[in-house]
Image: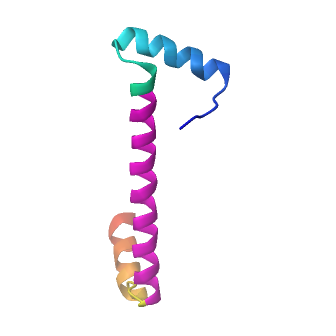
Amino acid sequence: MTIRVPQEVKDQLGKLAGVTHRSQSFLGGEAIQRYVDFESWQIAEIQQAIIEADAGDFASDEDFNAVIKKHAG
C-alpha cells in the first residue's frame, strides 16, 4: 500500500518515530488500525440506531418529559 501525506505530516511522523524508537511504517500501521477500528465502531452504532429507529424504539413523550423535568432541577 502506498499513501501520500503532506510533507508536514511526514516530518512529524519522522520525529515521532525517532522519539518512540518505532519505524514510520509501524506508526502508520497503528494510525490506520485506529482509524479503521473507530470508523467500524461508528458505522455499527449508526446501523444499530437505524434499526432501533425503524422499530419505533423511542421513549414516550411522557417518559422524555419526566427525564427533562428531573434533570432541570
**Magenta span main SS:** helix
Instruction: Report the number of numbered marks.
Output: 0
Residue at x-position 48% and y-position 11%:
15
Image check: 1 left or right of 23?
A: right
Determine which quarter of the picture holds residue 33.
top left
Residue extending farthest to the right is 6
Magenta stretch bounds: 27-54
Give me the residue at 64% from left, 18% from top. Answer: 8
- Asked whether 52 falls inside the magenta stretch, the response is yes
Judging depth in this view, the residue of 31 and 24 nearest the camera is 24
Residue that protrudes farthest toward the front in the picture: 1
Q: Position of residue 1 (x, y in %)?
A: 53, 38
Residue 34 at x, y percent in the picture: 40, 42
Quadrant containing the C terminus in the rendered view: bottom left
The x and y percentages for residue 67 are: 34, 74
Depicted 70 relative to depicted 34: above or below: below
* Magenta span includes 40: yes
Query: What's the residue at 41%, 90% (across, down)?
Result: 55
Instruction: Report if residue 73 is visible in the image.
Output: no
Q: Is residue 18 above or below residue 51?
A: above
Viewer-proximal residue among 6 and 59 = 6
Image coordinates of residue 14 in percent, x first then y, are 50, 14
- Write the residue at 35% across / 65% down: 71
Q: Quick check: can you spot residue 36?
A: yes
